[in-house]
Amino acid sequence: MILSFYAGEKRDLPWRKTTDPYKIIVSEVMLQQTQVDRVIPYFEKWIARWPTFSDLAQAEKSEVLAYWSGLGYNSRPIRLQKLAQEIVERGDFPTERDDLLKLPGIGPYTAGAVLAFAFNLDVPCVDTNIRRVLIHELGLPEDISAKELEQVALDCVPPGRSREWYNALMDYGAMVKTARKTGIRPTSCQSKFEGSSRQIRGKVLRFLLAKKKANYDSLMKHVEDVRLDDVLLGMIKDGVVEESNGEFTL
């Protein structure tokens, strides 16, 4: 039923037209907590600028951050570039789940997604939509553990068709078995952006992209928020911002 639905109703998405692990990873990182329609133009612009791991590995960090600006979570492009640099240094792309999990920014879901969508391997892959469909269609308890649900997902994969199967589950969850229709809540909810530390990070990033460098007083004048100290410490820890002699740069 789900594969039949997918055959007639599947969404036309640019990252579904490739099996390149680089492009799959870029799409998956961009799609984290971000709506599909919003990601598409960012993805296409990013791939046009840096079409390979090697291209991204050599890019200027400030330009990488500029291309990501507007997607939020500005530590993600930094980890994405570090991942590209590690892949280039390795000389190949790992196809074992445990090896993928050692790379920057790669968690269990992203590892499964890359192995399924790039290599069509029979692996567990559970995002919010897939989780909701499995719980609803199989009558599973909502508090089922992630490990148990991964095993269920793996058991359901039609052998040799993981790419098509997981894309079908995602579309079925996004278009038919939605959270509103099923009443199944996600395991986590995105915090409100307005007034959040994420909003302050965005302000700092845009200011530094425009000014190239700034001291603390000029940043505080721009941000006007007592949380600036903690935000700057976090951005430095994430590798987004650098500080030297009282000047902050990207």
Image (cartoon, rainbow, N blue to C red):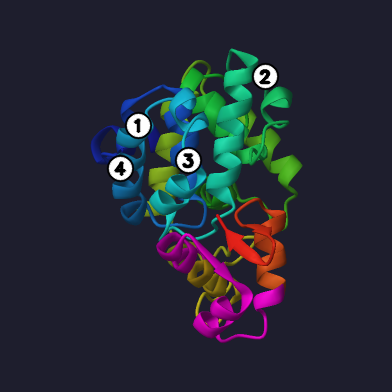
Q: Main secondary structure of the magenta part?
A: helix
C-alpha gap between disc 2 and disc 4 = 29 Å
**Frontmost residue, 204 versus 53:** 204
Give the residue displayed 66% in from the left and 70% down from the top: 231
C-alpha gap between disc 2 and disc 1 = 21 Å
Mark 1: secondary structure:
helix
Q: Amino acid at mark 3?
A: Glu
| N-term mark: 3 or 2 | 3
Circle 2 or circle 4, nearest the eye = 4
For the residues bearing labels 1 and 4, Cβ distance under 8 angstroms: no
| N-term mark: 1 or 4 | 1
| N-term mark: 2 or 4 | 4
Q: Which quadrant would the C terminus be assigned to in this image? A: bottom right
* Residue 124: quarter of image: top right
160 displayed left or right of 41: right
The residue carrying pointer 3 sits among few (fewer than 14), some (14 to 19) or many (20 or more) residues within 10 Å by Cα, namely few
- Write down the region rendered in magenta: 205-229
Give the residue displayed 51% in from the left and 48% down from the top: 133
Q: Is residue 65 visible?
A: yes
C-alpha gap between disc 4 and disc 3 = 16 Å
Give residue 16's mark: 1
